[in-house]
Image (spheres, helix red, strand yellow):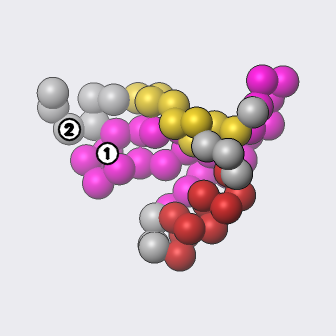
Amino acid sequence: MPPSCINGLVIDCEDLNAEIKTLTEKGIEVGTIDKTPWGIFAAIKDPDGNRLSLHQR
């Protein structure tokens, strides 16, 4: 698969705020938290430009 072809892979996590803290401490940029009726999400991009979405119910 070519770089940046994945858009929206969802990764379930128990504590989104803790995950964001850990990632930002490692220098990884995390998008704003989006609140929806089915949970909260935050987007990140991996080094290849793929868009990943962290999700907490």
Give the quadrant of the N terminus.
top left
Asked which secondary structure carries label 2, the reply is loop
The residue stretch that appears in magenta: 29-53
Q: Amino acid at mark 2?
A: Pro
Numbered-mark total = 2
Q: Residues within 10 Å of mark 1 (few under 14, many from 20)?
A: few
Q: Position of residue 2 (x, y in %)?
A: 15, 31
| Residue 35 location, quadrant | top right
Given residues 41 and 22, the one toward you in this image is 22
Q: Was residue 39 drawn as part of the magenta stretch in this picture?
A: yes
Q: Residue at x 44, y 30 (%)?
A: 9
**Distance CA(mark 1)–CA(mark 2):** 7 Å
Q: Was residue 36 drawn as part of the magenta stretch in this picture?
A: yes
Depicted 29 relative to depicted 49: above or below: below
Q: Position of residue 34 (x, y in %)?
A: 73, 40
Q: Position of residue 38 (x, y in %)?
A: 78, 23
Which residue has dot 2 on it? 3
Tell which residue pokes out farthest to the front in this image: 14
**Relative to 55, 49 lies left or right:** left
Depicted 43 relative to depicted 17: above or below: above
Which residue has dot 1 on it? 49
Q: Residues within 10 Å of mark 2 (few under 14, many from 20)?
A: few
> Is there CB contact under 8 Å for labels 1 and 2?
yes
